[in-house]
């Protein structure tokens, strides 16, 4: 499977490792990409935390997306740049992992994750434990070659209802097949929560662009809080996304929700700040 440990893997090397507690790692964004969304930077930090958590429980279980208390977008990441990743586990057992972490570029912090909690589920339901453990050893020893990741096509968002500058609902159609499912996950394909969040942010940004600007600079995502993912999103599934804006001075806030088959499956809050974009 050519896409394995390539299509949606964002740790090239684990450079420091304290068993069950903390780790540092690296990922180089391929130069040929048109962009590298901030949500994929968050994915890289989360994947490094997942390696530490899986190793702690002997690769019997793995974390999946659950709760993210706060994600701060502190700087843009460009193709060709190297992410220096760092994570620390506050707790980890067979039931759940709690962690925080950050990503830096050239010493400057570009993203921070705080108060994240993920339920731990049987690894064998999602992947071959032997293959995952072998990959962990590769990451700790030789590392993986850069340039493996070839980008992810964002799902199309079809607007259902819109009140300009206020609220928008859209349908997101998850592809039935996609290269990233080879990594997420081989035995049980699940649409990544970070790609869901990226789609929600894109939807909210379209609304924010319709707001009067307090200055010359456009709104840009600065922080996401209280993210809760309640159920898996599967290949071929249609999800209804909604973003509703409120405005306070130089900051706009958006309530984010995702529903499928009449059930709420994800929520969160997004802050957008009027600032200069490099």
Image (tube, rainbow, N blue to C red):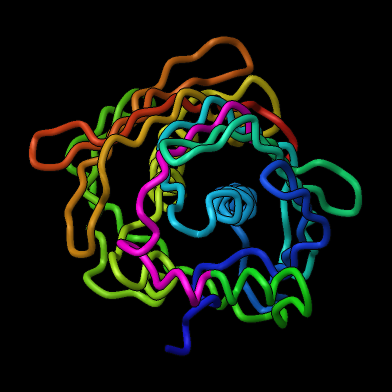
In the displayed structure, does residue 80 sit left or right of residue 235? right
Q: Position of residue 221 (x, y in %)?
A: 58, 35
Farthest residue to the front: give it: 58
Out of 119 and 33, give the one closest to the viewer.
119
Asked if residue 73 can be seen in this view, the reply is no
In the displayed structure, does residue 78 sit left or right of residue 205? right
Farthest residue to the bottom: give it: 2
| Magenta region | 113-132
Farthest residue to the top: give it: 248
Q: Position of residue 4 (x, y in %)?
A: 48, 80
Out of 163 and 156, give the one closest to the viewer.
156
Name the residue: 8% across, 41% down: 261
In the displayed structure, does residue 208 sit left or right of residue 52? left
Where 273 sits versus 39, above or below? above
Name the residue: 53% across, 25% down: 69
Farthest residue to the left: give it: 261
Q: Position of residue 46 (x, y in %)?
A: 58, 48
Name the residue: 49% across, 20% down: 253
* Quarter where residue 98 is shown: top right
* Quarter where residue 150 is shown: bottom right
The quadrant in which the N terminus is found is bottom left
Where 186 sits versus 85, above or below? below
> Exactly how many numbered labels are in the figure?
0
Where 120 sits versus 36, above or below? above
């Amino acid at each position: 499977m050519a896409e394995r440990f390539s299509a949606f893997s964002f740790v090239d090397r684990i450079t420091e490792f304290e068993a069950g507690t903390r780790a540092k790692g690296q990922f180089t964004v391929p130069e040929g990409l048109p962009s590298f969304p901030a949500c994929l930077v968050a994915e890289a930090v989360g994947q490094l935390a997942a390696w530490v958590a899986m190793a702690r429980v002997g690769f019997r279980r793995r974390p999946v997306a659950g709760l993210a208390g706060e994600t701060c977008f502190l700087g843009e990441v460009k193709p060709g740049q190297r992410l220096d990743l760092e994570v620390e586990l506050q707790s980890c057992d067979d039931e759940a992992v709690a962690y925080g972490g950050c990503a830096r570029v050239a010493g400057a912090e570009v993203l921070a994750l705080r108060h994240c909690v993920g339920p731990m589920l049987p690894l064998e339901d999602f992947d071959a434990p032997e293959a995952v453990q072998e990959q962990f050893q590769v990451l700790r020893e030789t590392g993986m070659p850069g340039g493996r990741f070839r980008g992810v096509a964002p799902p199309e968002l079809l607007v259902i209802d819109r009140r300009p500058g206020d609220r928008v609902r859209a349908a997101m159609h998850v592809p039935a097949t996609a290269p990233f499912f080879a990594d997420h996950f081989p035995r049980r394909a699940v649409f990544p929560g970070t790609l869901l969040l990226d789609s929600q942010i894109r939807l909210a940004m379209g609304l924010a662009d319709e707001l009067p600007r307090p200055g010359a600079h456009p709104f840009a995502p600065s922080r996401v809080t209280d993210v809760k993912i309640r159920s898996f999103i599967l290949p071929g599934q249609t999800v209804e996304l909604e973003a509703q804006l409120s405005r306070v001075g130089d900051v706009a806030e958006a309530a984010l929700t995702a529903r499928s088959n009449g059930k709420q499956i994800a929520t969160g809050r997004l802050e957008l700040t009027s600032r200069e974009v490099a």
